[in-house]
Image (cartoon, rainbow, N blue to C red):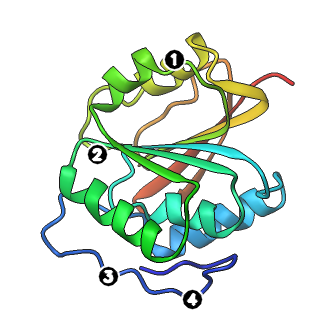
Amino acid sequence: MRIIGGALRGLRLNPPKNLPVRPTTDLAKEALFNILQNQIEFEGIKVLDLFSGTGNISLEFASRGAEQVVSVDRSIQCIHYLKDTAKQHGLNQVKAYKDDVFKYLQLETEQFDLVFADPPYDLNRIPDIPKIVFDKNMLLPDGLLIVEHQSLQNLSNHPAFVEQRKYGHSSFSFFKSPG
């Protein structure tokens, strides 16, 4: 696992082996950020990373100049790893919280330019994520929600759905808030 762009480009991340995670592969992450590079300006954006795990995606956004990155995961080991890594590399814009994502979403009142969710693939509430994000108006105008999920799963029935990109067994579904 490595940071592929921005100030920390090339940095290898070596999280402990015992973390309860399924990190986004470097191939899928590189494809995702190539897509995003052509759609958004990373500098100064506010990002919410749900089911952040190792913080791989959070650190990538911070490396590319995001102004604020809020990371949420229920594993205290993941949160400690992310906080330690962010501190070690001076990424003060990363704020990591240990919480159940769905409880967190019910209480969150901020709006974000981008919300990224990488839930466990066997989670039955994955389709609830777009519903909650849009019902709670969590995206700024022209904001983007990206949900990583198994390629066999289809999230296209949500009205804000834009497209699904497949990378082997993983897919990214994109949702856009009206501008």
* Amino acid type shown at disc 2: Pro
Disc 2 residue crowd, few under 14, some 14–19, many 20+, Cα 10 Å: some
Q: Tag 1, which secondary structure?
A: helix
Where is the C terminus found, in terms of image quarters? top right
Give the alpha-carbon distance from disc 3 to disc 2, as whole Å. 21 Å
Q: Nearer the viewer, residue 76 or 172?
A: 76
Q: Indicate which disc, 4 or 1, sits on the residue closer to the N terminus.
A: 4
User: Residue drawn at (69%, 56%), measured in percent from left and top?
Assistant: 66
Tell me the mark number nearer the camera, choosing from 3 and 1.
3
Give the alpha-carbon distance from disc 3 to disc 1, as whole Å. 34 Å
Tell me the mark number nearer the camera, choosing from 4 and 1.
4
Q: Mark number for residue 120?
A: 2
User: Residue drawn at (61%, 62%), measured in percent from left and top?
Assistant: 62
Q: Mark number for residue 19?
A: none
User: Residue drawn at (28%, 34%), measured in percent from left and top?
Assistant: 99
Q: Which residue is mark 4?
A: 10
User: Residue drawn at (27%, 28%), measured in percent from left and top?
Assistant: 124
Residue 160 in which image quadrant: top right
Residue 129 in which image quadrant: top left
* Amino acid type shown at disc 4: Gly
Disc 4 residue crowd, few under 14, some 14–19, many 20+, Cα 10 Å: few
Q: Which residue is mark 1?
A: 131
Give the alpha-carbon distance from disc 3 to disc 4, as whole Å. 13 Å
